[in-house]
Amino acid sequence: MNVSQVIVKILEREGITDAFGIPGAGINGLYKYMAESKIRHYTHRHEECCVHAAGGYFRASGRMAAALCTSGPGATNFVTGIYTCNIDSIPVIAITGQAVRAQLGLDAFQCVDIAKIAAPVAKRTWQITEPEKVPEIFREAFLTARSGKPGPVLIDLPLDVQNADIDYDPDTYVPASYDAPAPDMDKIRQALDMISAAKKPLLLMGGGVILAGAEKECVRLAETLNMPVITTYMAKGGIPIDHPLNAGHCGIQVGQPIGNHVFLESDLVLGIGCRFTDRHTGDIKVYRGDRKFIHINIEPSEIGKIFQPDLGIVADAKKAINALLAEAGRAKKSDWDIDVPTLRKKLARKTDYDCKPINPHRVMAELNKYFGDNAIFTTGCGITQIWSGQLQETNVPRNYLPSGGAGCLGYDIPAAFGAAIATGKQSVAVMGDFGFTFHVQELAVCAKNKIPVIVVVVNNAYLGLIRQNQKYAYGYEYAVEMAENQNHDMIDYVKVGEGLGCYAERVFDPNEISAALKRAQESGKPAVIDVICDPKVDCSMGASLANVREFVY
């Protein structure tokens, strides 16, 4: 059987129903059989976006997709997408075409060792030079992507390997099974003893809880032990907004006043499926303080990577939470006298601005009001991402899909496309005016496939986050002003959107945002809503949880 035909059969048996790619001469051997398969294929307009779309697909649905491209610069364009998935623990199968084996290492046209290039930012990479090994390597690749801390894998296929014949019956292929690690029960009991001894214990829900599908069990554990819940950015939506134990986010950028306040009051933190990364912790000395830490993570190397916890438990988040619930009777329910709902209301940031130009906080409030839980949101990087993380609300896990660890401009639109393909839900990309120009061409992909992604451009005509960093960290401003983005005789995002097959309009009045979103939805097309915002609004942030500077206008 032809190797490419074998690969397509394996993809089908592994449950791949959708692929995002760009064909090219270096991968046309595989595409011949993709055309004959049941796998739906979406042709993108930049290779990086194929991976972002496949990543958004998994983030929204929990199902894997494939990303495909040709060799050379097509393959190297995959790297940013692979890095973005890897740092957020998102499994994707990335397949690249390659020159024939005889040309490897000889500087042949579009021949680059992508397996070595991508290795530092992928969970694992392979270049297959022996056709007979294709089935076993693909089986290992799927297992690697899904097991433990999930992540993207890359398989590089020389063209003559794609076109080779091997003796293989695809009906014999069985996907590899995997048992997620269970916790050490002695450590589970030790954790509960530590929680019982604490006066102010809290539960830190990380993105690993969402990946494990354990958010409901996690909330039940918090209720059982009466522990306030703080979510990391990647766990947004893991607990209902109005839940009496929901203490919001904690962090120096996308954190919230209530989350930082409750965290600093705590004396023990039960962190499940989290990584204690820098934008969450800020100054590590302030973050650690005198409190004790229990850290549960599926990946052993994550425990102690940032700091050594008082107790580390290697386990799948769901298995660990269920074990804690099973033994919860041995723990004393916390009597921490904290009124989370009152604090949440008292410490909420102001969003009801009625000024012109529009305050970006109002944009986030209007998105909350109009969409509620009926949309999936993506956001990439910059000051708009931080406003979004601070102020957007959702009660639903997998409805808020940020580029968390990479902070990747250009992620937003293709990720929203992939999320919409996976779920059929309305997807909304929330981004700044500068970020909009990264991969805006993917709106043409949305239009062609009749996927009505809505792009909300928070247009403040600045590299806003960089301006703020220059201003407060260095005392200057240089090369960050982009007034042309609000000068519609020069740069017109409405025309850009219309030129790519979208409905588009511009909004100057905060009271018109909701109506504009309604018109966008009713158009039945992908849409661009260009919201003209105040160029000089700063975003609340700081160096430590105890020193976040708040701005009110």
Image (tube, rainbow, N blue to C red):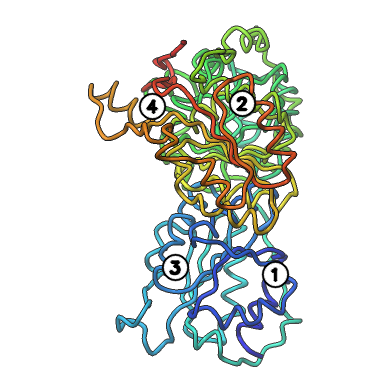
**N-term-proximal mark, 1 vs 3:** 3
Q: Position of residue 362 (x, y in %)?
A: 57, 20
User: Do tag 1 and tag 2 residues touch (Cβ < 8 Å)?
Assistant: no
Dot 4 or dot 2, earlier in sequence: 2
Please tell me the numbered disc located at residue 203: 2
Q: Of the residues shown, which amino acid type is indicated by label 3?
A: Ala
The three-letter amino acid code for the residue at tag 4 is Ile
| Residue at (59, 70) in percent of width and height | 140
Disc 1 target residue: 175
Which is in the foreground here, disc 1 or disc 3? 3
Q: Nearer the viewer, residue 164 or 427?
A: 427
Q: Nearer the viewer, residue 265 or 541?
A: 541
Sequence-earlier tag: 3 or 2: 3
Work out whether residue 54 can be spotted.
Answer: no
Query: Label 3 crowding class (10 Å Cα cut-off): few <14, some 14-19, many 20+?
Result: many
- How dense is the environment of label 1, judged by Cα within 10 Å: few (below 14), some, or many (20 and up)? some
The reply, left or right, for residue 153 in relation to residue 76 is right
Q: Position of residue 422 (x, y in %)?
A: 71, 53
Question: Which residue, given by chain and number where applicable, does mark 4 sit on?
Answer: 284
Alpha carbon distance from label 1 to label 3: 26 Å
Callout 2, which amino acid? Leu
Q: In terms of sequence position, does the residue under pointer 1 or pointer 4 come before the other? A: 1
- State the SS at label 4: helix
Figure check: 546 above or below 31: above
Which label belongs to residue 75? 3
**The N terminus lies in quadrant:** bottom right
